[in-house]
Amino acid sequence: MIVHSTIHSVMGPQGTTGFPPPIFFRQSTATDLGAMAERTGAEHLMLTHLIPPLGTKRQGPYPLPAALTEADYVDAATAGGFTGNIVVGTDLATLRLEK
């Protein structure tokens, strides 16, 4: 299982948000995390500390073209090639791991 903070590519410099590239490039994108999880053979990928959060129209002062959904993050991780289970962590989310 991989649990990792993530940023969605909509915040990237190629987009229209104006999000600063130096901040964007020091984060891991959902697509990159999907690729990494697939390469490592992980069965589960949990995306946490989402930038931008689900359902918001802004990330701080940076306007989004549209509010992102859980499906947007899942699609991004899948685009990286991940074929396992993807959990999009919301605030106060918990997971129960069983043997």
Image (cartoon, rainbow, N blue to C red):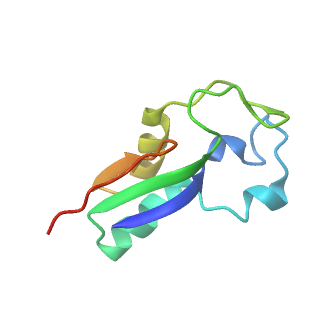
From the viewer's perspective, tell me whether residue 81 is left or right of residue 54.
left
**Residue shown at the point (57%, 55%) measured from the top left:** 6
Image location (x, y in percent) of residue 80: 44, 56
- Using the rendered image of the protein, determine whether residue 29 is visible from the camera's viewpoint: yes
From the viewer's perspective, tell me whether residue 69 is left or right of residue 41.
right
**Residue shown at the point (56%, 58%) measured from the top left:** 5
**Residue shown at the point (67%, 61%) measured from the top left:** 27
Kindly indicate the quadrant of the structure image that contains residue 68: top right
**Residue shown at the point (85%, 40%) measured from the top left:** 18
Above or below 64: residue 5: below
53 or 24, which is in the foreground?
53
79 or 57, which is in the foreground?
57
Q: Quadrant of the C terminus?
A: bottom left
Above or below 69: residue 39: below
Q: Count the labels in the image.
A: 0
Q: Quadrant of the N terminus?
A: bottom left
Residue lying at the far bottom in this picture: please name it.
40
From the viewer's perspective, tell me whether residue 45 is left or right of residue 92.
left
40 or 58, which is in the foreground?
58
Image location (x, y in percent) of residue 60: 80, 37
Kindly indicate the quadrant of the structure image that contains residue 84: bottom left
Above or below 42: residue 94: above
From the viewer's perspective, tell me whether residue 59 is left or right of residue 56.
right
Image location (x, y in percent) of residue 65: 70, 26
Kindly indicate the quadrant of the structure image that contains residue 63: top right
- Using the rendered image of the protein, determine whether residue 81 is visible from the camera's viewpoint: no
